[in-house]
Amino acid sequence: MATLTMTEHTSPQKPNDRSSIDRNVLTTETANSASEGFDTKSALEIARIINHEDAKIAAAVKKALPEIAIVIDTVARSLRDGGRLIYVGAGSSGRIASLDASECPPTYSTAPSQVQYIMAGGPKALASASDVNEDSPEIGQRDIARRRPTRKDIIIGVSASGLTPYVVGAVEYARARGAKTAAVTCNYNTALSEVADTTIVAEVGPEVISGSTRMKASSAQKMILNMITTGAMTRLGYVYDNLMVNVHMKNAKLVERGIRVLMSVCDVDRDTAIRTIKSAGKSIPIAVVMLKANVDKMEAVRRLTKSDGNVRLAIDDSRLEL
């Protein structure tokens, strides 16, 4: 049986000593006095305790808004320059990252290659535990190496503890290859923050069930990743006003959403919206530019190509010359 080595400090680990941090000093691993006697509580009391603790999450995320803004702009620049956003995670953090990555194509019509995720244990670990891989920085390095990170990419490591060797190894490797890097964690002064260019910390405190970071920590991470991709896609112009103009109409729900978006943005009736969408080849961005700029499809496509898909810039063609 392996022996765990503990230390008495919380300072960042040295690269060759990353297994030595005492997890007992991590706020995500300590016991929560608010949930003492939890197993003796009624269902309503359980729900109230969890709800009371969950109410602390937004405040913790708020403290990290400056760092979140930095990462939003970094992601937007990377995608604009033809790079990729690649999340790296394990366990609950990896599952949250995979969810955010998988929802970008249907929401913003991004290519699957633009926003990716790497999960310790591979896709099968989304539904079943693959804890052993979490402890290997070498496997993390191997998995990110397969994606061949470059200076155009941004790699974001997601780890509640900030210690997960798999994630630390992957982020460190990517940074050494020139990629931009960021960390999303719920503890300060960790190995992950040491290897990342920018660290986002949402210190949500102890979990209701000690160490169960699928609760507050994962909720905070979900909020942060939502902000990052929503903010980046908005900065890229895939959102017009507060509407999802880059929606890809693959099913009845999304077709109806596209029609409503066009009606709202362009202040037209339903028949006009449907007719324009058909003329635009079922592309909402093209349809919006056609109506707002009063141009034909060919000119709308030209403008969108020139603006890198930014709908607002494509509408006001004069701004593209600046």
Image (spheres, rainbow, N blue to C red):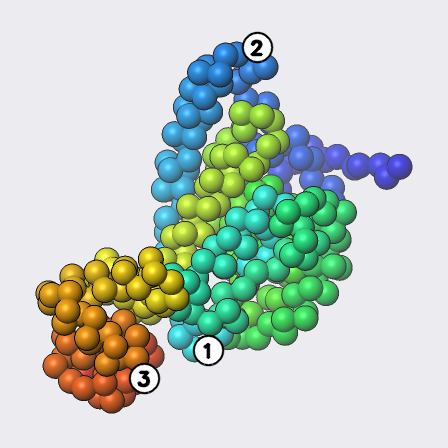
Tell me how far mark 3 sits from mark 1, CA to CA: 14 Å
State the residue position of label 2.
40
State the residue position of label 3.
305
Check disc 1 and give the amino acid type: Gly
Residues packed near mark 1 inside 10 Å, few (<14), some (14 to 19) or many (20 plus): few
Check disc 3 and give the amino acid type: Thr
- 279 vs 291, nearest the viewer: 279
Where disc 1 sits, the SS reads loop
The residue lying at 72 percent from left, 47 percent from top is 130
Where disc 3 sits, the SS reads helix
Give the mark nearest the N terminus, 1 or 2. Answer: 2
Measuring from the top left, give residue 15's x and y in whole percent.
70, 54
Tell me how far mark 1 sits from mark 2, CA to CA: 55 Å
Where disc 2 sits, the SS reads helix
Give the mark nearest the N terminus, 3 or 1. Answer: 1
The residue lying at 49 percent from left, 65 percent from top is 115
- 168 vs 310, nearest the viewer: 310
Measuring from the top left, give residue 5's x and y in whole percent.
79, 37
Check disc 2 and give the amino acid type: Thr
- Discs 3/1, front: 3
Q: Is residue 60 visible?
A: yes
The vertical placement of 199 against 234, above or below, is: above
Measuring from the top left, give residue 26's x and y in whole percent.
60, 34
State the residue position of label 1.
82
